[in-house]
Image (spheres, rainbow, N blue to C red):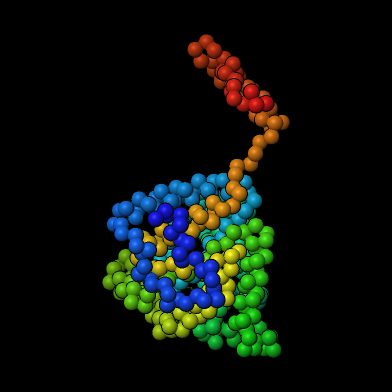
Amino acid sequence: MKLEKLADRFRIDKPDSFRLADIDPRDTAGLDIDKDEAKEMLKDSIQRLSDLQDVLYAQDRWAVLAIFQAMDAAGKDGVIKHVMSGVNPQGCQVYSFKAPSTLELDHDFLWRTTVAMPERGRIGIFNRSYYEEVLVVRANPKILAAQKMPPSLVGEDIWEERFEDIRNFEKYQARNGTLMLKFFLHVSKNEQAKRFLERIDDPSKNWKFNKGDVAERKNFDEYMRYYEELIRETSRPNAPWFVVPADRKWFTRLVVVSALIEAMESLDLHYPKVDQSIRAELQEARLALAAELPAKNGKKNGDKVNRKSAAKS
Ligand code: ATP
Ligand code: MG
C-alpha cells in the first residue's frame, strides 16, 4: 500500500453513517512490518513533510492546523513529538489547551483557540481544542455551570448549537486559507489501562500519571458516545476527522503523517516565483558580492557569471 493513501481509510467522509464501533483501535490496515521498518517509513515521511513545510513557509499563503483529541494516554504527546520532529520549529506552533483560565471563561468558547490559530505559512498543532467544549464540558455539568453563560442561553440544544458554531467556524477558516485536519486517536479501554499501569510502574513515567485520569476513565463509554456524535456532526470536507487506531503507537504516527502529507500535497504549494526584474537584481548583487571575494586561480570571482540566470534575464 502506498503510504500516502494510508490515511484515506480513516478519514470520515460519510459522517452521517459513521459508527465508532467500525474502527478497531488495534487495526494496522494489514501492514505487517516490524518496529524498525515502521521507524524507517516514518523517517522518510517526516522528511517529505519537512520539504512540504519549507514550501508552505516560503509561499506564505496557506496555514495548516492539525487538531488532536483523545482520551488520556492515547499518545497525543508522542504523535506530536515524533511527527513534528523533522519540521523547522520556526514554521510550527504547538498549543496545549487545559482547563480554561478566568480570563478565558470571560469570553465565548471559541476565543482562546481562535487567537492561537496558525499564521499563514505555518503548521499549527492543537493538543486538545474547542472540541473539549462538547466533551469534558458535556461529561461534567459543573464545568458548564462555571462558564458564566447567561442562563437563558443554556438550553437542551446547547450541544447542537455548539456543533453548528464549530462547523461555521471551520468553514470560515477554510475559506480564509487554513487547511484543517482533525485527529481522534482511538485507544481501547484495555490499552489505556495498560498504559496507566506503565506510568505507575516505570519511575521515569510517574510524572505522567494523574489520579484524575483514572476517575475520568469511569466515563470512558460516555466519552465514546460524545466522540461519535461530534465526529458525525463536524466531519466535513473542509475540516475532516480522521479516526486513527491508537493501540499501536507506530501505526498511529504513520497514519497521522500520511494524512498531513496527502492534504498538503493537495494544496498548490510552490516557492514564490521570481520575476525578470528581480532576477536582474539578483545577478547584479551576485556580481558585486563575487567581486568582494579574493580572486581564485588568477580569475576574478565576478567573472564567473551564472550562465543559466544570465541567459534568462
Ligand atoms: P497528558 O497526556 O499529559 O495528560 P493532557 O492533554 O491530558 O495531557 P492535562 O493537563 O492532563 O493534559 O489535562 C488537561 C485537562 O484540561 C483535560 O482533562 C481536559 O479535559 C481539560 N480541558 C481542556 N479544555 C477544557 C475546557 N474547555 N474546559 C474544561 N476542561 C478542559
Ligand atoms: Mg491528562
Relative depth, front residue between 180 and 210: 180
- The reply to whether residue 35 is visible in this rendering is no
Residue 99 picture location, percent across and down: 53, 75
75 with respect to 272 (left or right): left
Which quarter shows the N terminus? bottom left
183 with respect to 111 (left or right): left
Residue at point 31%, 74% (across, down): 194
Q: Quadrant of residue 236?
A: bottom right
309 with respect to 8 (left or right): right
Q: Quadrant of residue 276?
A: top right
Residue at point 56%, 70% (across, down): 235
Q: How many marks?
A: 0
Residue 108 picture location, percent across and down: 66, 75
Which quarter shows the C terminus? top right
| Image: 241 above or below 311 | below
Residue 185 picture location, percent across and down: 44, 69
Relative depth, front residue between 125 and 162: 162
| Image: 236 above or below 288 | below
| Image: 221 above or below 48 | below
